[in-house]
Image: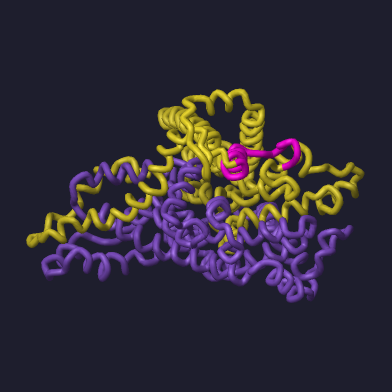
Amino acid sequence: MATLLDPVQSIHSAPARPVREGWGERIAPYVYIAPFFVIFGIFGLVPLLFTFYVALFDWNPIGEHVFVGLDNFRRLFDDPRFFGAVRNTLSIWVLSTVPQLIIALLVAHLLNHVRLRFAVLFRMSMLVPYITSVAATTIVFAQLFDRDYGMLNWLLSLVGVDPVDFVQSTWGSHLLIAAMVTWRWCGYTTLLYLASLQAVPREVYEAAAVDGAGGWQQFRHISVPSLRPVIVFTVVTSTIGGLQIFTEPLLLNPSAPLTCGPIRQCQTLTLFLYEQGFGQFQFGYGSAIGVALFVMVVVIAGINYLLSTRVRRER
Amino acid sequence: MTSKTRRSRRRPAERVRWWTYLGLGLAVAASLFPLYWMFVVATTDSATAYKLPPAVLPGGNFLHLADLVFTTVPFLRSLANSLIVAVCIGVGQAVLCALAGFAFAKLRFRFRNTLFLFVVLTMTVPTQLAVIPQYLIISSLGWVDTLQALIVPGLASAFGIFWMRQHLSTALNDELLQAARIDGANTWQIFWRIAFPLVRPAAFVLGLFGFVTAWNDFLWPFIVLKSPEMYTVQIAIKALQSNRDIDLGLAMSGSFLATVPLLVIFVFVGRRMVSGIMDGAFKG
């Protein structure tokens, strides 16, 4: 991370200019980095700026483009579907991030034993969900959480609990999507935490053990504080990922895919964007949703920046 | 490793407790069970998904169900499409990021640090929210319903450049580079003959992650691919699901078939993916 923040650092170590230097040699560095800038420019930066432009139009992909100023944004702020999508996105984000980080912390702590056997096997198994596609994950989880035939409801029925309709209810669908996200990312986050934990000198733990600190106290007072920077990092990445949840709600409810059910109970912002843009062909309105998403990302990134500088100051 | 000497000094009391294994065992079971269940449904019968109490053992019906998947949608074609896209993106990212990482780590040119800062900053921008203009650009290029619409945008990876730059600045020492210069090697020869072979393992891991991400991608292929012959496996799963609204079993078989190739690869190189993630993590 130090190199990331300090690109100037390595300039001193760079070799001196070669003696013979033709034109081809001089432009070589620019040619080597050009593919990224060209591709990112065309498919990343230009579309991002273009979103702000399209959002000012009533833009039909096969018809006319009429300039409407800020009308799309006015419409957006009067649209209960938009606020529903914001609520769903935030709710799913919280429900998936908090348990994920807690489980990852605990598992990473368990994995951080020098004498642990089968360590490689444990780590590899936990990464299997990460290589499983979101589409496949959603199909399996929708079945496991099914109201009538799902294994979870069957198990609940054994202990006398009435079946929960995870797919059709608001909280149920949020929990279900959060469970998928947690399942898929937990192992990945665990490995990030484990890498940070391994950087803590073993002597610190040994000294604590000598002073009589048990497993829980070591976890609470050594592991958690030393992981603070990486926790902030995973909160940020899971936020950016959380705002972009799309495939799970799309595939969860095959009878009403674009709204994730008849009452939009789990339609996320990205799915709302897709519905308006590619389902209703309102590119202008869809782009306005994109702008709103962009603002949310910037705000959250700002909050994170403030938090992480505070964390750094505390250390 | 110093851990070995430490290990011998450890007291028996510090042996790993049973509940550590219990906790990890539960975590592993939770990680693998959904895939196992997918396998059970994919090898028994579609009706397994609707049976209570649930079946717990796989059956011998795999070929019949797989056949059904292949006849309902052009699944073989989808597998080929996914393979083409994922291989192109994996290999392309590995080479292009190594090249750019090499330039940023070892070459001197104007605006180098500014340009690198720009690359790093692009990592924080979620470009997914710009899918509508992205689609407009792809359609003005005439690339709608083609595989290059997936491959070309997927080749740029800011993280990849950052990652390769880090590996190159430590792996390639400047004396070696100077010596090659004096021997008359040009920049391309230095990259291809000296720098790239040194960081090939890191480039391989990067390409692997590019491959997996491309194989599993959904939103963008869903937007730009229109005809079933162009579908990637993920979109084929969606087609299986909506083709037969209620037949979850068929979609499960498709999901299983779409996941198996990655699982096979993972058995051989999963260890390197694990260490890739752990190397990439910043440590405190």
User: Which chain shows up in yellow?
Assistant: A
Q: Position of residue A228 (x, y in %)?
A: 50, 37
Q: Is residue A123 visible?
A: no
Q: Position of residue B2 (x, y in %)?
A: 43, 58
Residue at coordinates 83% horizontally, 47% vertically from top-left?
A147
Would you say B66 lies left or right of A153 here? Answer: left
Residue at coordinates 89% horizontally, 42% vertically from top-left?
A162
The quarter of the image holding the N terminus of chain A is top left
Q: Position of residue A86 (x, y in %)?
A: 61, 32
Q: Position of residue B81 (x, y in %)?
A: 54, 67
What is the display colour for chain B? Answer: purple
Q: Is residue B212 visible?
A: yes
Q: How many marks?
A: 0
Magenta region: A261-280
Nearer the observer, A53 or B29: A53
Would you say B270 lies left or right of A306 here? Answer: right
The quarter of the image holding the C terminus of chain A is top left
Against B29, is B123 above or below? above
